[in-house]
Amino acid sequence: MRLFVSGLRKLSRRLATWVTFGLLAGLLVLILVATGATYEQAGDAPGAVGRRALLTFPGAYDSVLAFIVGLGGLLAVVYGAAVAGSEWTWGTLKNAVARGESRSRYVIVTFAAVAAVVLVGLAVTFAIGVGSAVVGSNLACISTAGLSDSATLGALPERLARTGFAIVEEGALGFAIATLFRSQLAGIGAGIALYFGEQFAGLFLPDIMQWLPFDAATAVLGEQAGIGGPGGGGIEVTALDPNTALVVVAAWLIGAIVVSALFTERAEIGG
């Protein structure tokens, strides 16, 4: 618990934390408010129906979640890589080991702190996104009557939990990659390459792509992400069943943590 609390305090002061979630929330606000502000000008132009869907409740709840799963997944990879890489480049891990901390325990607890911060950031970003959708709806003169739809609100906790689980898995991948490279920059670069590389894999391996980590993360909501998600780039792939996707995401998550812990346990820590 001491390590976990210490990790939370450390992450709460890091610029990477504020930049990552500030960027995600800022883009979400920009898209939804700008969509509402320009809705009247769109008229019957192509995409007008999609613009209205973004701002119409209760569907707007899913629009916000889709955005978080899409862009938030990429930012989670970068954030996880930044935190894990800094443990090596800043010598934090070396100091912890010198104090007698277990290597694998330190890595696991550090990732647990990352996961906690990601989940808090997700909740705050979702709240900001819903508020932005309400503002956008009012600017576009679209009714917000569906905001209190009981069926949607009843299902929302589960969908938020699924989204959080998916984002944590993507953060774990970035964390593991940076650990293997023992570098922030290399981890971030490789994580981004893996993220976009999976999209191109759909051109050649459409049946395999659904089992890959980012596509599986998108599938946990039961649909492809509507705004910039891994499946929303124009490549048609078969999505996993949402419950099957949860199992696949769990496997990638556990695998990433185990790889990080095992590598750190055997790695040479010098410098």
Image (cartoon, rainbow, N blue to C red):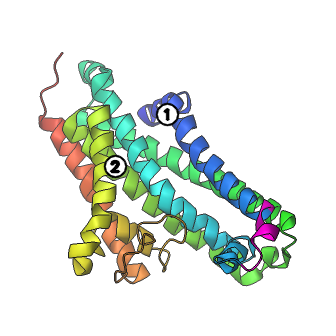
**130 to 187, vertically: above or below:** below
Q: Where is residue 221 in the image (x, y as percent from the top left)?
A: 50, 75
Q: Is residue 41 inside the magenta stretch?
A: yes
- Lateral position of residue 61 relative to residue 197, left or right: right
Q: How many marks?
A: 2
* Crowd band around label 1 with a 10 angstrom C-alpha radius: few (<14), some (14–19), many (20+): some
The quarter of the picture where the N terminus appears is top left
Q: Position of residue 266 (x, y in %)?
A: 11, 36
Relative depth, front residue between 134 and 156: 134
Kindly indicate the quadrant of the structure image that contains residue 82.
Answer: top left
Q: Mark 1 points at which residue?
A: 16
Looking at the image, which residue sits at the far top?
271
Q: Mark 2 points at which residue?
A: 192
Dominant secondary structure of the magenta stretch?
helix
User: Disc 2 residue type?
Assistant: Ile
What residue lies at 51% left-to-right and 65% top-to-bottom? 163
Residue 211 in sight here:
no
Kindly indicate the quadrant of the structure image that contains residue 208.
Answer: bottom left
Relative depth, front residue between 209 and 165: 209
User: Disc 1 residue type?
Assistant: Ala
Residue 168 in sight here:
yes
**75 to 135, vertically: above or below:** above
Q: Where is residue 258 in the image (x, y as percent from the top left)?
A: 23, 51
Relative depth, front residue between 61 and 251: 61
Mark 2 or mark 1, earlier in chain: 1
Marks 2, 1: nearer the viewer: 2
Q: Give the range drawn in magenta.
A: 37-44
What residue lies at 42% left-to-right and 32% top-to-bottom? 3
Relative depth, front residue between 179 and 37: 37
